[in-house]
Image: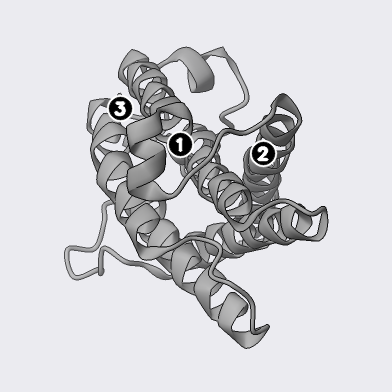
Amino acid sequence: KKAIPVILPTSVGDALTIIAAIALVYSLPIPAVQILWVNSITAVTLTVTLAFEAAERNVMERTPRDPKEAILSGFLIWLIIFFSLIIVTGTFGLFLWERDSGASIELARTVAVNTLLMFEIFYLFSARYLLAPSLNYQGIFGNRYALYAIGLLIVFQLGFTYLGPMQTLFATTAMSADAWLRVILVASSVLVLVEIEKLLLRKFSSLEKQSA
């Protein structure tokens, strides 16, 4: 269940970003070969780490799951939509920012694809707990495999951005420190927004239980 809102929003976000670009008669912010790169490395380096998650603290307090309940529940569908909208807004928004600032199409696309991956990295911390808060020591450092995967992904992405053969293969180009700062600031917003969303869901659920 935790892997679903990590894997699917990436594909949905890619599709929405492309649809937005087509609707605005704009160049594609992330070409097909870069989308294949993102899907290939994130599926292995990020989502697999969720298999090593320990059980959440209140797992034994939950009511038994209905065996007929679909894996893709309404709650997970909401998470997918919510995360996808954040992805497309941030990724396409930064792409437009770079183009409007005079950046080349290669640089704007490199910024966009790095924004997409950084979104996934930051979201992984929130995805470790579907409702419990993640902005604490356990939420950030509790799964060492997730930290290993993030470190490996960052190494891959630096090679994707700066190595000559990778630049030729994927049509990327080097990014400045300012561009990275914008990418990190925009992508980190997903962690804050999802944590606020979880806080509201917990508050709503507690009020619902009190009124029952």
The answer to whether residue 178 is left or right of residue 127 is right
Instruction: Report the Cα–Cα distance between label 2 and label 1.
Output: 16 Å
Please give the name of the residue rendered at 60% of the width and 65% of the height, measured from the top-left corner: 85
**Sequence order check, earlier mark of 1 and 3:** 3
User: Which mark's residue is nearer the viewer, 2 or 1?
Assistant: 2
Residue at mark 1: 124
Residue 121: percent from left, percent from top: 48, 35
The answer to which of marks 3 and 2 sits earlier in the sequence is 3
Front residue (pair 21, 2) = 21
Question: What's the residue type where badge 2 is placed?
Answer: Val
In what element is the residue under mark 2?
helix
Of the two numbered discs 1 and 3 in the rendering, the one whose residue sits closer to the viewer: 1
Foreground mark, 3 or 2, reads 2
Would residue 83 be found to the left or right of residue 146 on screen? right
Gap between marks 1 and 3, in whole Å?
Answer: 12 Å
Instruction: Tell me residue 162's x, y (percent).
Output: 47, 28
Residue at the left extreme, as displayed: 67
Q: Are marks 1 and 3 in contact (CB under 8 Å)?
A: no
Which label belongs to residue 53? 3
Under circle 1, the secondary element is helix
Q: Residue at x 53, y 62 (%)?
A: 84
Residue 154 drawn at (x, y percent): 44, 25
Graded by Cα atoms within 10 Å as few (under 14), some (14 to 19) or many (20 or more), the crowding at tag 2 reads: many
The structure residue drawn at horizontal position 46% and vertical position 65%, both measured from the top left corner, is 14
The residue lying toward the viewer, choosing from 153 and 127, is 153
Identify whether 52 is placed above or below 204: above
Q: Return the residue at label 2.
A: 183
